[in-house]
Every structure is written in C-alpha cells, then in structure tokens.
Amino acid sequence: MRAFLAGVVIGIVMVPATLFLFIWLGYAPVSTKSSPLPFERKLAGMALDKRIDKEAPKDSPMQPTEENLLAGAKIYIENCSVCHGTTTESETTIAKGMYPNPPPLLHGKGVTDDPAGETYWKVANGIRMTGMPGFSGSLTEEQMWQASEVLATADKLPQSVKDALAK
C-alpha cells in the first residue's frame, strides 16, 4: 500500500513539475517552424470539435442568393484571402509562415462539407493558437453569414461570384 501511495504522490508531483521545467527551461516548441508536441493536434482538434458541436448554429438564417454570395465574396477577399487564398492563389505569403497552416478554403473541398453554422462559428469566434481571429467585433452578423455561405457553397458558386473571388 505504501508503494502505491508513493507512486500516486510521485505522479501527482513529478508529472506537473516535469512539465513546468520543460516549459520554464525553454524546451517547449513555440515557433511556427517547430514540430508540434505529441497529441497537440489531436487534443486541440477534439476540443474545437466539441465546442463547435455545442455552440454552432444549426441552421443559417441567410439564403445563398447571388446577392448574398457576392457580398460574401467581397467580405472574403477583404478579410480572409490574406491567409486562406483566393481561387487563383492557394497559399499566400502570410500562410507560408503560419502554424498551423491556414487551409486554402477555395481549393479542393475546403469547408464545403461543413455546415454554414460551423463556419460561421469559426468566423465569429476565431480559433485560439492558430492565427484565426474572431470577427464578431469587426463584422456584422449578416456579413459573417454571407462569408460563411460563400465557403459552404464554394463548390457550386455562380460564375459572377467565382469572378469576384478570383480578383
């Protein structure tokens, strides 16, 4: 029983002390060029997914009309393309220096398989430790929904919206 208690005490004291020393002595990978810690992506992704499941709106209050999509394309070009690229540029200069790399949202499937509410949540709230800012203090709800609808329907946009995103 004594050995068990000693093991518990050592585990409770040694693990946090080792983690503290790892960080305090400067061994934690903090630059964008550093490899991630073990399980860093898995834990961060799990936390993000659970929070979005809990808080993201299930239905979009906005219809993906051409007018809304054109407005969303303008918002995307002005606020998002610097990191996420355009239809003609998949990786920007800024994106090359970020960790984790921002996904090229208008190439491949992007986030077209995500509900617009999930994208809206990410646009409104941002994602910690990724460089993704929250725009709820900068854009109106309507603007955030318009940009989210552009991304949710990026694989089937009208030509006028595609043209606007290519600029």
Image (cartoon, rainbow, N blue to C red):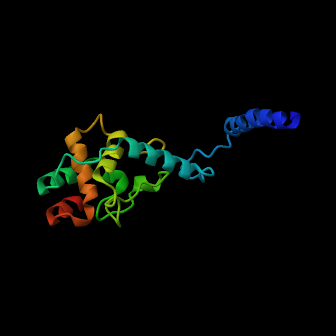
Residue 115 higher or lower than 133, as above or below: below
Name of the residue lying farthest toward the right: 2
In this picture, residue 30 sits left or right of residue 165: right
> Residue 142, percent across and down?
20, 42
In front here: 82 or 44? 44
Residue 130 in view: no
Identity of the residue drawn at 35% across and 61% down: 110
> Residue 43, percent across and down?
55, 48
Question: Number of numbered discs present?
Answer: 0
In this picture, residue 4 sits left or right of residue 162: right
Name of the residue lying farthest toward the left: 67
In this picture, residue 89 sits left or right of residue 141: right
Identity of the residue drawn at 23% across and 48% down: 60
> Residue 26, percent across and down?
67, 40
Please identify the quadrant where the N terminus is shown.
top right
Identity of the residue drawn at 27% across and 51% down: 148
In front here: 22 or 41? 41
Residue 4: quarter of image:
top right
> Residue 89, percent across and down?
33, 63
Please identify the quadrant where the C terminus is shown.
bottom left
Residue 83 in view: yes
